[in-house]
Amino acid sequence: MRIQFVDQQDRAEGLGVPYPKGESIGSENVGYHDVKKIPDSVALFPELQGWPELRDLILAANQSDSIFRTLRCDISSNEVRGVGVGYEHKISSYITLAFELLDFNTEDNFRKMYGEFQSYVAPITIQQDCCIEFELVPTSYRSAENVAYPAWSVDVWIHGYGPNEEEAKTSWLDGMLAVKGFILDQNTRYRTILRTNRKKIGDFCV
């Protein structure tokens, strides 16, 4: 397995939260839904159809007592053609992850989170044909009064490779379970930080 932190701030496309339906280009977008507040809203996401594992990851990240929330997601399964590629199928997914505490969404905190992920997966045996990437996303969190809070979020990419879709999915599942386990571990270790008076995304972006 390969893991890396991707810092392309100069080329990264910013994200505004919440965002309206149809803002994305090239794929169906149902708009931002607060899965933390309404867990059943995951049923509205067309990209999750046929991918219950990704749905479960999103629900785990958005538990009511979770220190995280997801902002968006997507997944694709494609044949790969090319000389010397070494595999014929690739499954790629991402979830955009934010800390529930608004002022926690700093570049330094996401770098620290990546460091903790490195430590978490170090003793775990994961398929070699798997890659997990953390990519910084400039993010503006907007209140109901349209007051913007400029900060960050992170795209957590999971790539699985194989000679066919079945084996690519096996590699992808290994990575997905590692990310899910990490999120649950972080919640267990740090959920007490939510017991403060600091502003939460769920209170700000309503």
Image (cartoon, helix red, strand yellow):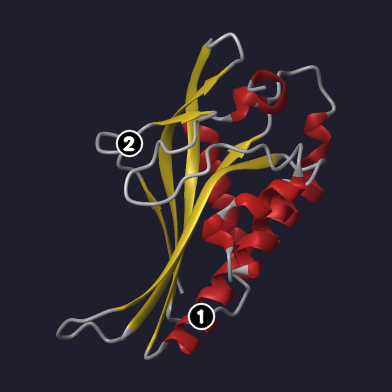
Q: Is residue 118 visible?
A: no
Q: Residues within 10 Å of mark 1 (few under 14, many from 20)?
A: many
Quarter holding the C terminus is top right
Q: Is tag 1's residue or tag 2's residue first in the polypeptide sequence?
A: 2
Is residue 61 shown above or below 142?
below
Tell me the element at label 2: loop
| Residue under the image location 77 percent in, 41 percent down | 190
Q: Does residue 94 appear left or right of residue 58 in this picture?
A: left
- Quadrant of residue 34 in the image? top right
| Residue under the image location 78 percent in, 47 percent down | 63
Q: Residues within 10 Å of mark 2 (few under 14, many from 20)?
A: few
**Residue type, label 2:** Glu
Disc 1 marks which residue?
169
Which dot marks residue 13? Answer: 2
Is residue 191 shown above or below 14?
below
Q: Does residue 80 appear left or right of residue 172 in this picture?
A: left
Q: Position of residue 125 (x, y in %)?
A: 59, 80
The reply to whether dot 1 and dot 2 touch (C-beta < 8 Å) is: no
Viewer-proximal residue among 128 and 55: 55
Q: Does residue 189 appear left or right of residue 74 in this picture?
A: right
**Residue type, label 1:** Lys
| Residue under the image location 38 percent in, 52 percent down | 27
Tell me the element at label 1: helix
Task: Kindly report the distance in space between the C-alpha atoms of the residues bearing marks 1 and 2.
Answer: 28 Å
Viewer-proximal residue among 124 and 179: 179
